[in-house]
Image (cartoon, helix red, strand yellow):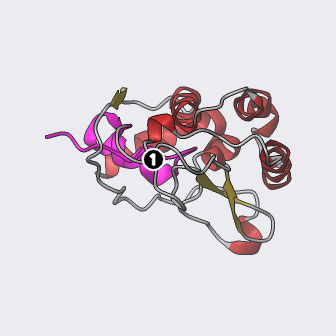
């Protein structure tokens, strides 16, 4: 039986590597929304530390992920854009991808599920993942088990390699060279 990955917002490099190892990235989109998880949060490698960015959701009502709405009460989009720009503005490929990433956050998306799907599809396409992406309406999934091998990061000289951050990090630091990163990983498994 194929392994499903959890529905993460801007998932980590390890998340993608788990799918690549399985031969396809199967994402389970059914079930309930769980608070304080990577369904509404993602981590970036900031200049001082790993920073977790959260998307606020409307509380109450349905607990299904498919019906969880993003709150418009909080100016979270500006905070996320500012944090991403601060963290990756000096990354080698930031200027080649920032104008593609930032509209995802600015979109009038009101459903958390839609934002998750858009973020995963975007990263899968831009990072040129070598395996297909499949969304399934199931809730059984396995957490990623792979630890991402190191690659160059913007603040690596200060903090060393920071693992388990969003694949946005890989995109801004390696850009089209991510295909070589995937190839090297596949040769090692």
Quadrant hosting residue 26: top left
Residue 133 place in picture, x, y as percent: 39, 28
Q: Is residue 132 above or below residue 26?
A: above
51 to 168, vertically: above or below: below
Residue 10, magenta (yes or no) = yes
Residue 90 appears at what percent x and percent y? Answer: 84, 49
Q: Is residue 62 left or right of residue 55?
A: left
- Residue drawn at x 26%, y 42% is 22
Which region of the structure is painted magenta?
A: 1-29
The spot of residue 102 in percent (x, y) is 77, 33
Image coordinates for residue 6, horizontal then vertical, percent:
39, 47
Q: Nearer the viewer, residue 54 or 63?
A: 63
Q: Is residue 113 above or below residue 149?
A: above
Q: Quadrant of residue 77?
A: top right
Disc 1: which residue:
63
Point 59% across, 37% down: residue: 177
Q: With 178 as the anchor, is 81 left or right in this view?
A: right
């Amino acid at each position: 039986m194929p392994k499903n990955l959890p529905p993460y917002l801007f998932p980590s490099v390890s998340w993608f590597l788990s799918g690549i190892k399985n031969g396809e990235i199967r994402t389970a989109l059914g079930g309930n929304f769980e608070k304080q998880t990577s369904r509404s949060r993602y981590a970036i490698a900031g200049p001082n530390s790993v920073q977790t960015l959260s998307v606020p959701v409307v509380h109450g009502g349905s607990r299904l992920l498919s019906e969880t709405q993003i709150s418009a009460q909080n100016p979270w989009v500006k905070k996320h854009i500012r944090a991403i720009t601060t963290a990756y503005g000096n990354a080698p490929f930031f200027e080649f991808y920032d104008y593609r990433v930032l509209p995802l956050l600015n979109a009038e998306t009101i459903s958390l599920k839609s934002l998750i799907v858009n973020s995963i599809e975007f990263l899968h396409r831009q990072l040129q993942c070598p395996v297909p992406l499949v969304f399934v309406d199931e809730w059984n999934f396995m957490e990623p088990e792979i630890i991402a091998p190191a690659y160059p990061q913007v603040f690596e000289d200060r903090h060393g390699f920071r693992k388990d951050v969003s694949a946005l990090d890989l995109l801004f630091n390696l850009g089209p060279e991510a295909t070589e990163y995937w190839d090297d990983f596949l040769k090692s498994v």
